[in-house]
Amino acid sequence: MKDGKTRSVYFVSESTGITAEAYGHSLLSQFGDARFTIRYSPFINTRDKAQALADELAHRAEAEGRKPIVFATMLDEEINAILKYAQCNYFELFDRFMSDLIEATGMEPSRQAGMSHGLVNLENYEARIETINYALNNDDGMRLNKFDQADVILIGVSRSGKTPTCLYLALHFGMRAANYPITEEDFEVGDLPDELLEHKDKVFALTIEPERLAAIRELRRPDSDYASLRRCIKEVQMAQDMFHRHGMTVLDSTTHSIEELASLIKKSL
Amino acid sequence: MKDGKTRSVYFVSESTGITAEAYGHSLLSQFGDARFTIRYSPFINTRDKAQALADELAHRAEAEGRKPIVFATMLDEEINAILKYAQCNYFELFDRFMSDLIEATGMEPSRQAGMSHGLVNLENYEARIETINYALNNDDGMRLNKFDQADVILIGVSRSGKTPTCLYLALHFGMRAANYPITEEDFEVGDLPDELLEHKDKVFALTIEPERLAAIRELRRPDSDYASLRRCIKEVQMAQDMFHRHGMTVLDSTTHSIEELASLIKKSL
């Protein structure tokens, strides 16, 4: 690292590697992501595949002059052992916590891979897929009558971050998230439609700094009135007036990522 | 657990709690998710909030007759200490790995929260949001000329799982994922369009069991020819013939979740 070279980091799992990635990424982000070269090794679910990966790690350790870092979530003890003694700095999640968790729960783990992100419960899975379809089909505010089916409704001016946040809520939390874009028509009427206000208790309002909004819109429609700072300032101000008038929860997408917005919404429910 | 009651589990973090959730969920899935009641406590970023949570944990431990399980990712040592000594079975990710990781990297962690899922690098973040817009705008195969911008192109018959997988690839991996639905027109022509075949190297084909496809389509358009098993069998067979003719990588969405499909695609690139 000190010599400016990046270091190889592997995310390894018998299944998707999503958990290994989440925890490895979280830990690495404390040291500055840019210094690491990320390599994905999901579905290392046989001893042969583990041995092949161990060979690759040894090869890379020699070529790069230092051991790769490996973040892993392994359930099979033999596969785990092959990697544990390979040429790497090995960070394995399950091994370190499992015995404590067995003690805390008084239960035994299944040690089956794919339980976390696989097709374990088809009914739950299909319900989650359905929330994605719901988000896509209720992305334009055109189906005002469908709001009674929504778990949450995100509102805000065009390009304030509603759609990606709705999709994240659906994909990650399985929530039915509709969105309603505040348009010219609402500004002319001077208020939000009754069909929306009826469901005020599940509305979250997104605001955004006008400068940032103008930059985002500029990418979409360069040199348009739509992207002008003047118009963005006016829209954001008028939208915020509406939010405050109705006492709505307002979240700022300038300072919060879609993951943070989604977590704040999930927490508030 | 043995008495049939569920046990409270908390996902706690100074930031979104996404990492705490991923690792907690992964570990718990080994014991059967249904036995636990999940509670989200993100943004526990002050000592006061930690103390309030500790009080809640004590309260719940007394009410439920056993300590809640807490999965946490804490960077601030004082906040961590408040929870560590609260009435709970405490599983904290960072503490257990950080010293080993400091030794492995020879670097010091920033101990700043929000580094993993916050708005740390605006340029990267906006690029990721743009991939979501790309997936949404290239969801119907109507923009054949945009395929040169795609990192991957998913193809398959209607309702084979292309759209949710594309969205996951965008949201999670920041990949530009387009999709192309194989339609009646393609079946009549008997082959895929040249504009798609030009990019064959980045095409992943999704297949699905006809019975499952019929069930999914039935929810969409009940009692339609579109949802009939006869038609689903025919479409899947004709699509598979095309995939094989062009030597495309075929993945099965009957047996793989969107997370697994996305990981397989990411791994193959």
Image (cartoon, coloured by chain):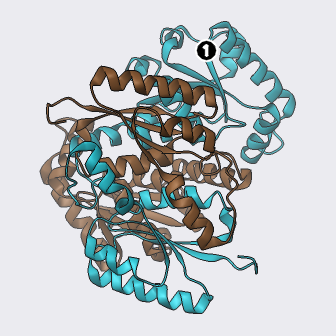
Chain colours: A cyan, B brown
Counting from the top left corner in percent of width and height, residue B219 is at 23, 37
Image quadrant assignment for residue A124 = top left
The residue at 32%/56% (across/down) is A98
Q: Which residue is mark 1?
A: A248
Counting from the top left corner in percent of width and height, residue B58 is at 41, 25
Depth check: give the residue in front, B79 or B152. Answer: B79
| Position above or below: A212 against A234 | below
Looking at the rendered structure, the secondary structure element under dot 1 is loop
The residue at 22%/54% (across/down) is A109
Image quadrant assignment for residue A85 = bottom left
Image quadrant assignment for residue A79 = bottom left
Is residue A19 rendered to the left or right of residue A233?
A: left
Q: What's under tag 1, amino acid-wise?
A: Met
Give the farthest residue toward the front: B85
Counting from the top left corner in percent of width and height, residue B24 is at 39, 47
| Position above or below: A44 against A171 | below
The residue at 26%/77% (across/down) is A46
Q: From where the camera sits, is residue A244 visible?
A: yes
